[in-house]
Image (tube, helix red, strand yellow):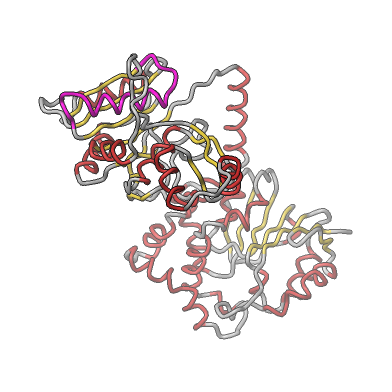
Amino acid sequence: MCEKPELLITVCSHRTLAAPTAGSFDQLRFSDIPWLQKLVVGDALISRSRSAACTHFLEDELQLPYMLFIDDDITFTPQDVGTILTHLKNGYDIIGGIYAVRGASQLSSYGYNGRLDVDGKIHEIEYLSTGFMGISRRALEKIKAELKLPELNKNDWSRNFPFFECGRCLNTDEFAKTLGDMFKTPPSDKFLKRWLKFSGFRVREKGDSIYISEDWDFCDKARLCGIKIYADTSVQVGHMREQIFTPENVLGVQQQQWREKTIHGAQTNQMNLIQKIDEDLSEFLAQPVNKIREQMNTAQKDLAEEWDDSGERFYEKNTTYLFDLALFNKQEDYFRNRLGQLVNISKLKILDIGCGIGTTAFMMSEQGNDVTGWDINEDCIDFCNFKKDKYKLGGTFTTEKPDFSEFDFIIAVDTLEHIKDLKGFLKDLGTNMKYGAKFYHSDFFPKENAWPMHYEEHAKSLDKWLGQAGLIVWDGRWCIRGQ
C-alpha cells in the first residue's frame, strides 16, 4: 500500500471473510493502488452497518476522497479496484462493477427498464448493488446536506446518518391510497415533493409495491440530489455461493456431463468448427482470409445474379455456392432450427443428400453413425474431404449418386427446394428406399427477392409427392418408408 492513500475499502460483515475474498485482498496488497481497509463487524443490520461506515468515512481525520464497498463474499482483482478508483478520480460520484446474484439467475444491478447491456462499457443505471460500489466523499456530503439526514443512535456504538435504509416502496396507486388515509385534504405538489425528499418514503411509478433494499434506497437518495449512478460492465467481479454438496449432487453432475457429451457433444463440436469456416476456406482455396470473408458476405447476392434456371447443372461447378453455404451454416440459429431434431441419433447407416460443406454429415458421423455425404457440387465434396482430413472427422463424400436402398436414414437439409424435377426425384427416392427407413427434410421454399433458385411452386405439392413415393408423412419434416 502507498503512503498517501486515496481510497478506503470497507467490508461490512456479520460473518467471516470468505477465503477467496481474503485472497483478493492479499493480491491487492502487492499493487501500487493507494488504499486502506476498514472492516465493519458486529452488526447484523446491514443498512445500519453501511450507514455507520459512511458516517465514519466522512468524519475520519484522514478525509480520504473516495470509498469502495466490497462484500465479504466478492472476489476481485487489483485491476478491478484500480478501474473504479480511476473512474471516481475522473468525476464519477457513484460507480461500481457488476456481478451475479447467488445462483446466477440475474445480475445484481439493474439498468433502466430492467435492462443492462454487458458490453464492456460504462452505463448509467437505476440501481447499483453495494457488493462492489465506489462512492466519492462529495456525493455523501451532498446527500447528507440536501436530504438533511438526521443523526441516529447518537449516544451508542451504532451512531450514524441513515445513508442506507430498507423500507416500503409503494406504487402510485398504493401511494395515493396512503395519502388519502394520511391527509384529509390532498397536499400540494410542492409539499408532496419536499415531503418525499426528506421523509425517506419511496414511490415507484410502475410495478408492484415492494420492500426496497438498502442499496436501492441509497441510489434513490443519490438521484434525489441530482447524482447519477453508473456501472462499468468491464468490471466483472465474482460472487461466491455457499452450498452443501452430497453424493447425489455428484451423480447429478455426472449425468449432466454425460448428456452434454453424448447427446449434444457432436453438435457443440460442429458449432465450434463452423466458426472457423472462413479460415478453412482460406486454406482450402489458397486465398487470403479477408478475400474469403468478402466473398462470403456477397455470395447470396452473387448467386442470385448468376442463376440461369438450369436446375441441378447450375450447382455442379459453382464455387460461389461454397461461400453461400459457409455463411448460411454459420448463422446462430442454423443448428437449432435445422439440426436440433437430429441429436442423439446413432448406430445407423445414413445418407446426407445435398451435403454441401458437410455440416450435417460430420455431426451425424460424430454421433456414431456410418454416414455418406452426397452432393453434385465438386467443390463442396473436395472441401468436405479437406475438412475431414484436417480435423480427423468421419464420413464418406461423393458426387456419385448412391443406392438409396442401402440406408436406414436419409437426410436432406435445405436441398429439396433446389431440385427442379422434385416430383421425379422423390419418386426415385421413395421407390428405392427400404421398408422402415426414415427420411428427414428441412426446407425453405420461398423465393422472396434473394433466392430465385428456389422452386417455390413445389411447396404446395410436397406432401402429395411424398405420399405418392410411398413415404408416410409424420409431420412437416419426418417421413417413413411404408410397404
Query: Looking at the image, which is closer to me, 46 or 355?
Result: 46
Say which quarter of the image contains residue 211: top right
Determine if residue 247 is in view.
Answer: yes
Residue 204, above or below 15: below
Q: Name the image quarter holding residue 288.
A: bottom left
Is 275 left or right of 93, judged from the image as shown? Answer: right
Name the foreground residue: 238 vs 269.
238
Q: Position of residue 193 (x, y in %)?
A: 43, 48
* Residue 233 appears in the picture as rendered: no
Q: Is residue 4 left or right of residue 216?
A: left
- Is 49 a magenta residue? yes
What range is drawn magenta here?
A: 41-64
Q: Position of residue 313 (x, y in %)?
A: 59, 79
Residue sitting at 23 percent across and 29 percent down? 58
The residue located at (65%, 47%) in the rendering is 343
Residue at the spot x=28%, y=36% of the render? 140
Which residue is most to the left? 3
Position of the C terminus, as image quadrant, is bottom right
Depth check, front residue: 254 or 229:
229
Q: Position of residue 267 (x, y in %)?
A: 57, 47
Q: Is residue 25 above or below residue 463?
A: above
Q: Can residue 142 be found in the magenta stretch?
A: no
Q: Residue at x 19, y 42 (%)?
A: 89
Residue occupying the far front of the picture: 185
